[in-house]
């Protein structure tokens, strides 16, 4: 099995999963389509993102990172590329690199002239077929997660609160943010604040 990284303590390899044959065939067909679209429009942001996402769904994380990194050479101010590369850095346990990418993405989205928020399509849609997250909320959610996994709970709290404050934050994302906010505050010993985070 292909190795995609190592565990945080270095004791175990992170291996790709073995997919059932039918599932693998479907994922590989989706990847082939995404690769073709990217080849036809090599500078198109959506094509870059979906090429990387389809690689990620097959656990080919290092390749996904490489696709996004190449995209950033052409589009160094595109927050979507940092957002998705940061997500893949989390997967391969490179949390500091993930933080750097998410902070860059957040900066590019913030303030006057920043990239506005928008709904992100799901690669594996829910039963209702309704996307539940946005560019901005995904940036802050994963920034908070990377901070949490580094034990940086104060910074995680700040990221989760920023995510909840996003105007397009859906109820699904508010629940997700509140859960991680609660856990971060508990680890800081701020029990009353943690309980308040669940009030809604």
Image (cartoon, rainbow, N blue to C red):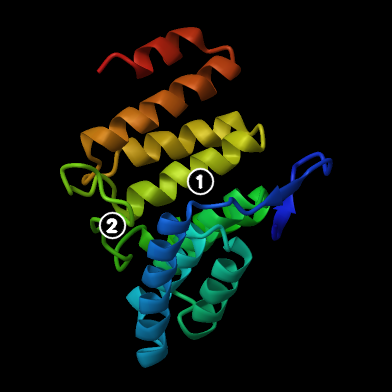
Point out residue 163 in the picture as x, y percentages from the top left corner: 36, 41
In front of the other: 46 or 137: 46
Q: Measuring 62% from the left and 54% from the top, which residue is drawn there?
A: 16
Q: Measuring 36% from the left and 91% from the top, which residue is drawn there?
A: 40
Q: Residue furthest top?
A: 192
Q: Quadrant of the N terminus?
A: bottom right
Q: Measuring 38% from the left and 40% from the top, which residue is drawn there?
A: 162
Name the mark on residue 143.
Answer: 1
Q: Which residue was labeled with disc 2?
A: 120
Residue 79 visible within the image: no
In front of the other: 18 or 130: 18
Choose the circle earlier in sequence order: 2 or 1: 2
- Judge whether 89 appears above or below 141 on screen: below
Element assignment for label 1: helix
Query: Which mark's residue is nearer the viewer, 2 or 1?
Result: 2
- Judge whether 108 appears above or below 106 on screen: below
Q: Residues within 10 Å of mark 1 (few under 14, many from 20)?
A: many
**What is the quadrant of residue 196 in the picture?**
top left
Q: Measuring 44% from the left and 15% from the top, which residue is drawn there?
A: 194
Q: Residues within 10 Å of mark 2 (few under 14, many from 20)?
A: some
Point out residue 5 in the picture as x, y percentages from the top left corner: 72, 54
Name the mark on residue 117.
Answer: none
Q: Quadrant of the C terminus?
A: top left
Element assignment for label 2: loop
Residue 121 visible within the image: yes
């Amino acid at each position: 099995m292909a190795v995609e990284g190592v565990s945080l303590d270095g004791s175990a390899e992170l291996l790709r999963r073995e997919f059932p044959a039918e599932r693998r065939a479907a994922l590989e067909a989706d990847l082939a389509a995404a690769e073709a679209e990217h080849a036809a429009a090599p500078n198109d942001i959506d094509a870059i993102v979906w090429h990387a996402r389809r690689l990620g769904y097959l656990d080919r994380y290092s390749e996904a990172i490489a696709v996004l990194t190449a995209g950033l050479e052409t589009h160094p101010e595109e927050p979507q590329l940092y957002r998705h590369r940061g997500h893949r850095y989390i997967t391969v346990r490179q949390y500091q690199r993930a933080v750097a990418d998410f902070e860059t993405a957040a900066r590019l989205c913030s303030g006057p002239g920043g990239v506005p928020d928008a709904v992100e399509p799901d690669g594996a849609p829910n039963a209702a077929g309704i996307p539940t997250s946005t560019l901005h909320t995904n940036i802050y959610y994963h920034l908070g997660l990377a901070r949490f996994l580094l034990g940086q709970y104060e910074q995680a709290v700040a990221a989760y609160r920023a995510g909840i404050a996003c105007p397009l934050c859906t109820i699904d994302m508010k629940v997700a943010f509140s859960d991680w906010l609660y856990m971060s505050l508990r680890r800081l010993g701020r029990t009353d604040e943690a309980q308040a985070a669940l009030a809604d």
